Amino acid sequence: MNLVALLVVCALATLRTGANQCTDSVCVVDDQSLRFFAIGDFGGEPIWPWYSPVQKDIAEAMEKLGTERNTHFQIGLGDNFYTTGVTDVKDKRWKDTFEDIYVGDALKRPWYVIAGNHDHRGNVRAEVEYTKMSDRWVMPDLNYTIKYQIGQGAEAKLVQFVMFDAILLLGYMPPKKLWLDAAMELIGIKRHDFAYTDQSESQWAWIEQHLQQSTADYLFVMGHYPVYSIGEHGSTQALIDRMIPLLHKYHVTMYMSGHDHSFQHIQLTENDSQGKPYTVDYVVNGVGSRGDHSTEHKAQLPAGALKWNYPTGWDGGIGNLGLTDGGFTYFEINAQLGQLQFLDKAGNEKHSITFSPRK
Ligand SMILES: *[C@@H]1O[C@H](CO)[C@@H](O)[C@H](O)[C@H]1NC(C)=O
Ligand SMILES: *[C@@H]1O[C@H](CO)[C@@H](O)[C@H](O)[C@H]1NC(C)=O
């Protein structure tokens, strides 16, 4: 990340949480643990009132838990504005879908955001620009890294997030017109037939460079598209082919995405660079404004890889209206271990997993 971008990230973090001390490369949290939310596909509705009832419930539950736990920040995993992103930094959607929904002091802390396919349908650079106008929206580029240090001295632990742009990486610019997208599906061109561009290779190189150089105790890779998914969109072959080997080679702690509107916990064990088995957690977290019950691509997953998913059962497809299911995740990471809780729209825990520092 360039220096200016880092300074913006850290200045905002300092501004909002007070307790954090940020230099140009890392924010130090003088605390026993790092606590944050991650939420995906929280882009509301493309029609009035521009948010979904589920999204509003989630925002309230986040604010409540954030106040209770004194969280440090939140992460947004893309599809920030349905269905065609924003037009510019003055678009009313900023207020109607984001600013007026995520209210309360706990949610005024930094929002580290990446773009999804729906953001790329609009003016995605305006989402980067908005960083300069907001006191909490942080998107210094389409891709960037964040580092947080827990504690000081010899006991300190480093948590790093590699935030990449899945649309740049996969070289797929979604059609600007929804009818075109629908027409493509109708004639059998799936949404995951990606076409590589020059930007894809530099994005892959950027990801690998950051993983290779990382000294973090907990290392997260976050992008909008899932590697594996049982949901409506299913798995992303290009990520299966090229992302999985990188994650296991560099001992990444967790890969997190949105895109399919469900929670999924998937675990894979693959050889690392020494030929030793290494397990990575894969999490789909796309229930920030609606919940999709689809499991139509379950057969695409390796046997036994799916550990848990939500929501379940038949709902006749109404989940995507944003009136019923949804949720968000809460992380608490300390020197010994990390915990990830999957919470429903009311803040009730549905499932939780723990993970250890990298070796
Ligand atoms: C984002 O990735 C590109 C390569 O695709 C790289 O040139 C650029 O420096 C990255 N941005 C940041 C802030 O690191
Ligand atoms: C992993 O490495 C072992 C040897 O250490 C080898 O027997 C095995 O086939 C490898 N598995 C894969 C999936 O490459």
Image (cartoon, rainbow, N blue to C red):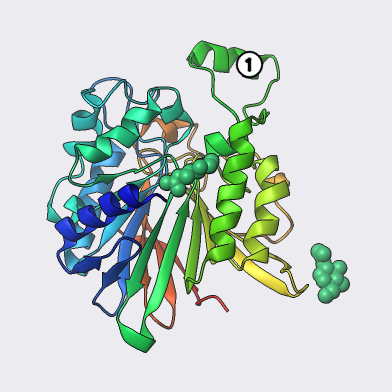
Q: Is residue 326 left or right of residue 190?
A: left
Quarter where residue 27 is shown: bottom left
Point out residue 203 in the picture as x, y percentages from the top left corner.
57, 43
Q: Residue at x 64, y 31 (%)?
A: 192
Name the amino acid type tagged 1: Met
Quarter where residue 184 is shown: top right
Quarter where residue 119 is shown: top left
Above or below residue 336? Residue 21 is: above
Task: Work out whether residue 270 or residue 45 is closer to the camera in this orientation and state it.
Answer: 270
Q: Residue at x 46, y 35 (%)?
A: 116
Q: Is residue 276 left or right of residue 214?
A: right
Q: Residue at x 67, y 71 (%)?
A: 278
Point out residue 235 in the picture as x, y percentages from the top left corner.
65, 42
Can I make out residue 308 in this image?
no
> How many labels were placed on the picture?
1
Q: Is residue 205 left or right of residue 262?
A: right
Q: Which residue is mark 1?
A: 184
Q: Would the CB of label 1 be found within 8 Å of ligand 1? A: no
Can I make out residue 131 in this image?
yes
Q: Residue furthest front?
A: 3
Q: Secondary structure at mark 1?
A: helix
Indicate the quadrant containing the C terminus: top left, top right, bottom left or bottom right. Answer: bottom right
Query: Pointer 1: residues within 10 angstroms few (<14), some, or many (20+)?
Result: some
Q: Is residue 34 left or right of residue 185?
A: left
Point out residue 40 in the picture as x, y percentages from the top left corner.
40, 45
Point out residue 270 in the picture as x, y percentages from the top left corner.
72, 65
Task: Work out whether residue 297 or residue 77 is closer to the camera in this orientation and state it.
Answer: 77
Above or below residue 104? Residue 278 is: below
Q: Residue furthest bottom?
A: 154
Q: Residue at x 60, y 55 (%)?
A: 208
